[in-house]
């Protein structure tokens, strides 16, 4: 039986990752089971008037903003930088994760007010982190990730599976995964966490089956997923 790659991100992110995995990972089955869906939230576009630039910690935020041709955008990583570039911003890669982005902004110390276009649920408060450096940041929620419940067939598939590999891309998703999984444990469950903070949201029995990607980005996650899919099952998960 081929291992299952369980993808819990919203569409189209899960579909995009599935396509990459189909080309670059060992043979597997893909099970897309989003734990949330991305929806826009109302905001006042006038909050961007006079801004010296925007901060983007998610590629999703770029698609909900109005056109701002040439406006500088400090972005968390390559995927967000590319999304900002396609949206017409003067996109700048901040280094690959939130900590690197904060360091970049502190080092460059841009003048004027910056707008952090963000989701309603944050893994890290960028504005608070930059406040000691004297930067002026306006928080602007433009989307939210609304929780979704798994239909019964998802848990049935996981319960009957042997090896299951699941990449988790945020601490919030890790918490939702634990809630949705409940007492179900595939015979051989492997979790790939994007960061130590993400892995820390899992209970001890699941942390024992978790590895953290070498870097907090999609290529590193894909490489680790490929490694987990290629390994032979070490036996049942004991809880």
Image (cartoon, grey):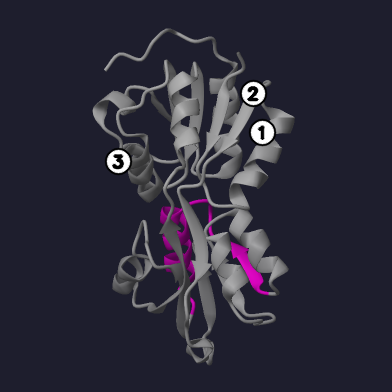
Q: Quadrant of the N terminus?
A: top right
Q: Which residue is mark 2?
A: 28
Residue 192 can be seen in this image: no
Mark 2, secondary structure of its residue:
loop
For the residues bearing labels 2 and 1, Cβ distance under 8 angstroms: yes
- Which mark is first along the chain, 3 or 2? 2
Q: Position of residue 157 (x, y in %)?
A: 50, 27
Q: Is residue 105 magenta?
A: yes
Q: Which mark is residue 201?
A: 3
The label nearer to you, 2 versus 1, is 2
Q: Position of residue 80 (x, y in %)?
A: 59, 59
Nearest to the observer: residue 188 or residue 224? 188
The label nearer to you, 2 versus 3, is 2
The magenta span reads 89-110
Identify the residue at horizontal 47%, vertical 44% (top origin).
169
In this view, the residue farthest toward the front is 152
Q: Is residue 219 above or below residue 65?
A: above
- Which mark is first along the chain, 1 or 2? 1
Q: Which mark is residue 149?
A: none
Q: Which residue is mark 1?
A: 21
Nearest to the observer: residue 237 or residue 119? 237
């Amino acid at each position: 039986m081929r291992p299952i790659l369980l993808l819990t991100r919203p569409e189209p992110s899960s579909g995009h990752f599935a396509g990459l995995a189909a080309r670059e990972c060992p043979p597997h089955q893909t099970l897309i089971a989003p734990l949330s869906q991305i929806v826009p939230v109302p905001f006042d576009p006038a909050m961007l008037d006079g801004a010296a630039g925007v901060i983007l910690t998610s590629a999703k935020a770029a698609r909900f903003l109005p056109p701002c041709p040439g406006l500088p955008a400090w972005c968390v990583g390559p995927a967000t930088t590319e999304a900002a570039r396609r949206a017409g911003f003067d996109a700048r890669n901040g280094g690959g994760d939130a900590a690197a982005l904060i360091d970049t902004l502190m080092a460059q110390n841009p003048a004027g007010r910056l707008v952090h276009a963000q989701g309603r649920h944050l893994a890290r408060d960028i504005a608070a982190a930059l406040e000691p450096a004297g930067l002026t940041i306006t928080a602007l929620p433009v989307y939210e990730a609304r929780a979704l419940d798994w239909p019964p067939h998802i848990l049935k598939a996981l319960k009957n599976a042997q090896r299951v590999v699941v990449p988790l891309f945020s601490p919030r998703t890790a918490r939702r995964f634990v809630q949705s999984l409940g007492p179900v444990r595939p015979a051989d469950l492997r979790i790939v966490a994007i960061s130590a903070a993400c892995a820390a949201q899992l209970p001890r029995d699941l942390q024992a089956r978790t590895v953290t990607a070498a870097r907090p980005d999609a290529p590193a996650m894909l490489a680790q997923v490929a490694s987990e899919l290629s390994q032979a099952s070490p036996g049942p998960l004991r809880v």
